[in-house]
């Protein structure tokens, strides 16, 4: 069995506009792949396809050697939770009704973990990403973007995913938060042998953290 | 300046004069409705032709109507019936609308298209006519009126719920929940419906006065409640007959009661909706 998250010949159209044209991308366990491209080149769409959230119009995604049929709820929860995604805007990616503690514990609660165990794990992860306990009782509107993105990272790691996709996840954050989150991701990757995809238009960030960088030209096919 | 002098507790929006007034009006109205048979155990339909169209006085606080019935007494009993019809009909409508909207949005595809075409078809028919048709099929009663209003007023709720769910469903926080392993049911009950619920509640409350008016129209046409039964609608219509003789109180009193109670209801719903939104709640320092 090959431990990798692979996109095979992915094609995506939005209203007849071709966004991705037969794109191949492979994220092996333990490696950090950078994905670069101008805005509109389909970086986020490719990340959503790999996160099993968007059904491509052509091609397929394979997870650890297994070709996946369907996306979202067509896949069992155990498969979906193998791949985690971190979005650019933590505000849009969090349910405003939940406290940060509930937010981090939610994926565990959703898959049947008892309340106390889920809470304990949420506290542990909050500590890992640098959230103080007093922040956990707050709701998203009462914390900063950086604090909220930390909570999102904690939530993404809660199921110990094999692959973590970061879609411009640090673009809105200050340099120190950015560095801290990157360190958390690197540590997690080292411990669990996870594959990481960094989507960014920031070349410096990618050369610093990624083991290799793939270029995605506008509407075309990737090189690199 | 007086604002600053008030203790923090009293500066909370819960104690705003408008909210206090609305609560008092509503609590008084509901309490009066519940206690009416105890407070005033006379027959509100008893006719006294020796005392027709008497102006308001100490004996008859709101005067009497063209059949000599006490307007204040009858308004109280009328409010009972009208509020019951309005509230139950609005709940029936919200229930049907919420269910149809949720099923349409979550099933999608053919189910969605079929349900929304049903909604369009019903919306294309005059809803009063459809209501009359439903009442005519049943025996005239409270239940028939409630059913007739409930079955013709769920369309807007269904559309609101469906469109809200469809727009919420594309939000990244739903993607995050799906990626986190949440089932369809959990996404719906934990992340989608709680956001739609305030909307449904608001639509339901706004429906209450509308349902009361609808009951009036049905009663006016002789298809709603029997004319001797007091409802605010029946009374306003009855009162019209006395207007030209100068007896304004026979329709004004039940009319004012209707306006006061429905306005109070609307004010409190607005407050409730604000409380449900966490960001607004933070801004209100609650």
Image (cartoon, rainbow, N blue to C red):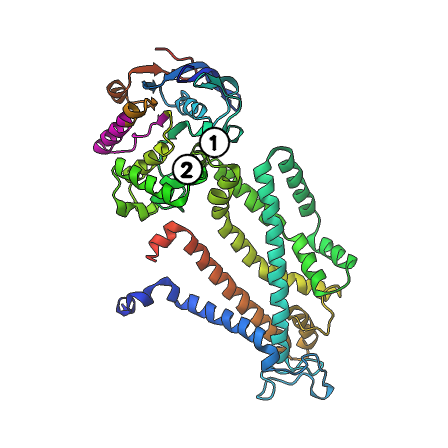
Quadrant of the rendered structure where residue A221 is? top left
**Residue annotated with mark 1:** A77
Where disc 2 sits, the SS reads helix
Residue A29 x, y percent position in the rendering = 35, 19
Point out which mark residue B45 bears.
none
Point out which mark residue A107 bears.
2
* Label 1, residues with CA under 10 Å away: few <14, some 14-19, many ≥20: some
Residue at position x 75%, y 66% in the image: B222
Residue A55 x, y percent position in the rendering = 51, 24
Q: In this view, does B59 lie to the left or right of A150?
A: right
Residue B189 x, y percent position in the rendering = 50, 44
> In the rendered structure, which disc, 2 or 1, sits on the residue that comes first in sequence?
1
Residue range highlighted in magenta: A164-187
Residue at position x 38%, y 29% in the image: A85
Question: Which quadrant, please, contains the N terminus of chain B?
Answer: bottom left
Q: Determine whether B102 is above or below A183 in the image.
A: below
Q: Is residue A131 left or right of residue B147?
A: left
Task: Decide which of B277, B131 is in the foreground and name it.
Answer: B277
Where disc 1 sits, the SS reads helix
Task: Decide which of A98, B32 is in the foreground and name it.
Answer: A98
Residue B261 x, y percent position in the rendering = 54, 68
Q: In this view, does B106 lie to the left or right of B115?
A: left
Residue at position x 44%, y 59% in the image: B271
From where the camera sits, is residue A129 visible?
A: no
């Amino acid at each position: 069995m090959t431990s990798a998250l692979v996109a095979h010949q992915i094609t995506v159209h939005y209203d007849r506009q071709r966004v991705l044209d037969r794109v191949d991308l492979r994220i092996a366990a333990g490696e950090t792949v950078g994905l670069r491209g101008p805005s509109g080149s389909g970086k986020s769409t490719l990340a959503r396809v790999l996160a099993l959230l968007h059904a491509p119009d052509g091609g397929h995604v394979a997870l650890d050697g297994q070709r996946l049929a369907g996306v979202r709820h067509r896949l069992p929860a155990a498969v979906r939770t193998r791949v985690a995604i971190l979005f650019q805007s933590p505000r849009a990616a969090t349910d405003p009704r939940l406290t940060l503690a509930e937010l981090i514990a939610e994926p565990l609660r959703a898959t049947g973990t008892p309340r106390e165990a889920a809470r304990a794990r949420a506290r542990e992860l909050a500590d890992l990403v640098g959230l103080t306990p007093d922040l956990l009782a707050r709701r998203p509107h009462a914390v900063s973007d950086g604090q909220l993105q930390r909570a999102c990272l904690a939530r993404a790691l809660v199921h110990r995913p094999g692959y973590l996709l970061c879609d411009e996840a640090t673009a809105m954050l200050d340099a120190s938060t950015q560095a801290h989150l990157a360190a958390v991701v690197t540590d997690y990757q080292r411990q669990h042998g996870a594959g990481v995809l960094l989507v960014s238009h920031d070349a410096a960030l990618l050369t610093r953290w990624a083991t290799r960088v793939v270029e995605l030209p506008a509407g075309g096919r990737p090189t690199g | 300046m007086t604002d600053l002098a008030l203790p923090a507790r009293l500066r909370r929006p819960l104690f705003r004069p408008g909210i206090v007034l609305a609560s008092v009006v509503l609590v008084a109205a509901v309490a009066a409705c519940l206690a009416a048979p105890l407070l005033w155990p006379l027959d509100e339909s008893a006719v006294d032709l020796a005392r027709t169209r008497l102006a308001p006085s100490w004996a008859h606080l709101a005067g009497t109507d063209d059949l000599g019935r006490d307007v204040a007494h009858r308004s109280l009993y009328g409010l009972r019936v009208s509020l019951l019809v309005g509230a139950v009909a609005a709940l029936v409508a919200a229930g049907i609308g919420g269910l149809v909207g949720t099923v349409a949005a979550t099933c999608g595809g053919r189910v969605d298209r079929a349900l929304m075409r049903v909604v369009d078809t019903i919306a294309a028919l005059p809803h009063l006519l459809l209501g009359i048709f439903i009442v005519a099929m049943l025996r005239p009663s409270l239940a028939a009126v409630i059913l007739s209003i409930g079955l013709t007023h769920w369309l807007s709720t269904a559309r609101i719920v469906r469109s809200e769910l469809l727009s919420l469903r594309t939000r990244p926080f739903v993607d995050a929940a799906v990626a986190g392993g949440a089932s369809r049911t959990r996404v719906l009950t934990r992340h989608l419906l709680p956001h739609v619920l305030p909307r449904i509640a608001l639509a339901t409350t706004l429906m209450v006065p509308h349902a009361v008016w609808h009951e009036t129209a049905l009663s006016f046409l002789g298809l709603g409640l029997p004319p001797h039964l007091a409802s605010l609608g029946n009374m306003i219509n009855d009162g019209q007959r006395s207007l030209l003789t100068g007896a304004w109180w026979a329709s004004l009193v039940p009319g004012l009661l209707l306006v006061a109670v429905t306005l109070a209801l609307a004010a409190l719903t607005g407050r409730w909706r604000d409380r449900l939104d966490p960001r607004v709640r933070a801004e209100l320092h609650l």
